[in-house]
């Protein structure tokens, strides 16, 4: 089973890594990261505004 975690502008690290840590433990799962356009996805601020 392939599971895609979507990356988007101004995501936080936990938006992607949190689900990855859980979903990657499912037997037979392949977790990938995907975005609407190619290239790096810019993460948001690392601290609250």
Image (spheres, rainbow, N blue to C red):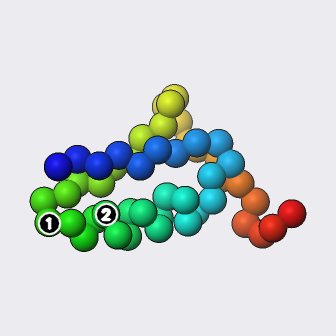
Q: CA distance from mark 1 to mark 2?
A: 9 Å
Mark 2 neighbour class, 10 Å CA radius: few under 14, some 14 to 19, many 20 or more? some
- Residue at 47% across, 64% down: 17
Check residue 15 in the rendering and tell me which mark sits there, or answer none.
Answer: none
For residue 47, which quarter of the picture? bottom right
| Image x and y of residue 25, in percent | 25, 70
Local SS, label 1: loop
**Residue 7 appears left or right of 12:** left
**Residue 21 appears left or right of 24:** right
- Residue at 63% across, 59% down: 12
Q: Would you name the residue on which mark 1 appears?
A: 27
| Image x and y of residue 27, in percent | 14, 66
| Image x and y of residue 31, in percent | 29, 54
| Image x and y of residue 36, in percent | 50, 30
**Residue 15 appears left or right of 3:** right
Mark 1 neighbour class, 10 Å CA radius: few under 14, some 14 to 19, many 20 or more? few
Q: Would you name the residue on which mark 2 appears?
A: 23
């Amino acid at each position: 089973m392939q599971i895609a975690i979507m990356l988007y502008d101004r995501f936080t690290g936990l938006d992607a890594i949190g689900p990855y840590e859980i979903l990657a433990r499912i037997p037979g799962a392949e977790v990938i990261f995907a975005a609407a356009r190619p290239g790096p996805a810019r993460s948001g601020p690392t601290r609250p505004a």
